[in-house]
Image (spheres, helix red, strand yellow):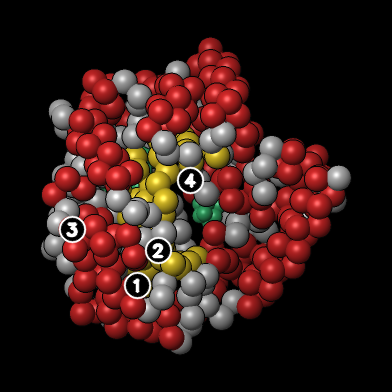
Amino acid sequence: MISIRKGIGALRDQRSMNFLYSGKRSPVMINWAITGGCNSKCIFCEVPFSTSKDVPLQRMHELIDEMMSHMPVRGFHLVGGEPFVRKDIWDILAYLHKRKAQVTVTSNATFVDRFTPPQLEILRKAVGLLRISIDSADPPQNDELRGVPGTTERVMKSIHILLQEKRPDLAITTVVMNKNLTQIPHLCRLAARLGIFSLEFQPISPISIFNGTHAIESKIDLVPRMPVEWECLNRVIDEGITEAKRYGLQTNLPTFKLYAVPYFRSLGQSSNGLFQKELMSDFRCMKINRSMFVDFDGAARPCSILSSQVGNVKQESAQQLWNKLGAFRYDEKKGELPDACKYCFCHTGENLRASALLSPWKNRKLLSYLLKNDQI
Ligand SMILES: C[S@@+](CC[C@H](N)C(=O)[O-])C[C@H]1O[C@@H](n2cnc3c(N)ncnc32)[C@H](O)[C@@H]1O
Ligand code: SF4
Ligand code: SF4
């Protein structure tokens, strides 16, 4: 009975997705890397450590006005670099709040102890969801992965401050690689202990996550490439699912289980088959239909993974850039996604849901699995 109700809800959702899909006039979401600066040195991230190319505050205000009034978009996901290294982050957040934008921020959360009470107040009002990066429940290992000693202590301090405040919703986000595979259930227990009830896992990307910077060469060694590691991964995901049920946590583990091993396996293959096609019929990417990615230097791209740049928000209006991105949406609709999509590490869950909803019959097993596991 619950499943039927959920199915109807999901189909209703499909109608809205179709509507959004055919609307094309504007993105629902702007994913914005608002800075290329960072205070961490994560061993898997090639952040440019430069703030010189960031889109200036005044131009950000103009763009936010345009995006909220004329397009209009619904929400913003601010990433970076580290969003809180921008000194004017408080102006940006306050402005987004004034324009009634829904805001999510992904952060390394190493700064919260330095926030003043008025800044905490802006955070509370402006940010709906704060995603905090933690890659291991073992402090020395987390420090090693995040590249700066003492990181974990500061993150924990931040979380305690946030938990005492009337705060944005908190979620933990984790990059899964060979060094921390077994941490999945531990991270579930840590989240429960801390009082954070949402966790998201994503596989490590071996390509540079910042266009224009070279991928860290040793990063490929962090990719689980051996069958024994894949077996271990499936096992610990199952353990994580059990722990999540035990503590009432919301996680993407059931979806992650579907694609983590196919993703890692495909990275070792030279053929250009997209791993996504093993998992779903009529593979659709909702990401490029619903959102626009703005890089730290202002470059507008279809998503954070595809390097093609259609222009720059410093010079062009958001609407012009969205229209130019229509070429990618057109190709996607024809089922022509580029080979680079095999590196799609952070959007596969969303695309699994979209494909199941847009082609429910062909993806009936997938749809039923997603419904059963609360992934829709
Ligand atoms: C680029 S960071 C920006 C936000 C912030 N600095 C942080 O670390 O949360 C956004 C997310 O990407 C993740 N990330 C960084 N490098 C990655 C990689 N090579 N593969 C997968 N995820 C990665 C980070 O851990 C973080 O959760
Ligand atoms: S993952 Fe985030 S915190 Fe780590 S180096 Fe990259 S941008 Fe900085
Ligand atoms: S990499 Fe491909 S599948 Fe992933 S979000 Fe970008 S366009 Fe979509």
Sooner in the amino-acid sequence: mark 4 or mark 2? 2
* Separation of marks 1 and 3 at Cα, in angstroms: 17 Å
Sooner in the amino-acid sequence: mark 1 or mark 2? 1
Kindly indicate whether the residue at mark 2 contacts the one at mark 1 (C-beta within 8 angstroms): yes
* Separation of marks 4 and 1 at Cα, in angstroms: 26 Å
Of residue 322 and residue 71, the one placed in the foreground of this image is 71
Q: Which residue is mark 1?
A: 97
Above or below 278: residue 49: below
Q: Which residue is mark 4?
A: 346
* Label annotation for residue 117: 3
Q: Which residue is mark 2?
A: 103
Sooner in the amino-acid sequence: mark 3 or mark 2? 2
Residue 97 picture location, percent across and down: 34, 72
- Mark 4 vs mark 1: give the one in front: 1
Kindly indicate whether the residue at mark 3 contacts the one at mark 1 (C-beta within 8 angstroms): no
User: Ligand 1 lies in which image quarter?
Assistant: top left
Above or below 296: residue 23: below
Specify the amino acid type for callout 4: Cys
Kindly indicate whether the residue at mark 1 contacts the one at mark 4 (C-beta within 8 angstroms): no
Element under disc 3: helix
Residue 22 picture location, percent across and down: 67, 75
Specify the amino acid type for callout 2: Val
Task: State yes or no: Cβ of the residue under disc 4 lies below 8 Å from any atom of ligand 1.
Answer: yes
